[in-house]
Amino acid sequence: MLKSFRLISILEGISFLLILFVTMPLKYIWDNGDPNKVIGMAHGVLFLAYVVMAFMMKPELKWNNKTLGIVLLCSIIPFGTFWMDRRYLRN
């Protein structure tokens, strides 16, 4: 389950960065919103999977509520999931 959570966290972080730095400029500067719809949907699914998996990992990794809060907060901060992976998931 840890490998799955690590994979989801990395993919969620990549999709978030794609939205911020690729699809949003395409949408608002060049009036092309189609990539934003596709990447946005994928990011939404990955975000929900990340949140569910974080709650599932809490008892397995013996996280307290503060750690869980930090892990969840990392999902809305650019590059946060990469930091979280290094800090909390790598042994």
Image (tube, rainbow, N blue to C red):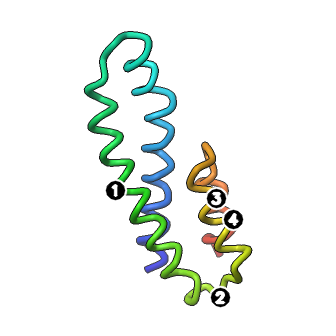
Mark 2 vs 1, N-terminal side: 1
Identity, as a three-letter code, of the amino acid under mark 3: Leu
Tell me if residue 13 comes above or below residue 61 in the rendering: above
Query: Which quadrant of the figure contains the C terminus?
Result: bottom right
Query: Which label is found at residue 45?
Result: 1
Residue named by callout 3: 73
Residue at (29% x, 35% y) in the render: 37
Distance from disc 1 to disc 4, alpha carbons, whole Å, reads 20 Å
Amino acid type, callout 2: Lys
**Residue 7 in the image, given as x and y percentages of width and height:** 43, 62
Q: Are marks 2 and 3 in contact (CB under 8 Å)?
A: no
**Is the Cβ of the residue at disc 1 closer than 8 Å to that at disc 4?**
no
Q: CA distance from mark 2 to mark 3?
A: 18 Å
Q: Kindly identify which residue carries mark 2.
A: 62
Q: Residue furthest right?
A: 66
Q: Secondary structure at mark 3?
A: helix
Assess disc 1: are there few (<14), some (14-19) or many (≥20) residues with their C-alpha within 10 Å of its C-alpha: few
Picture disc at residue 80: none
Three-letter code for the amino acid on which mark 1 is drawn: Val
Q: Residue at x 47, y 45 (%)?
A: 14
Q: Secondary structure at mark 1?
A: helix
Report the Cα–Cα distance between label 4 and label 3.
5 Å
In this view of the protein, which residue sits in the foreground, 85 or 49?
49
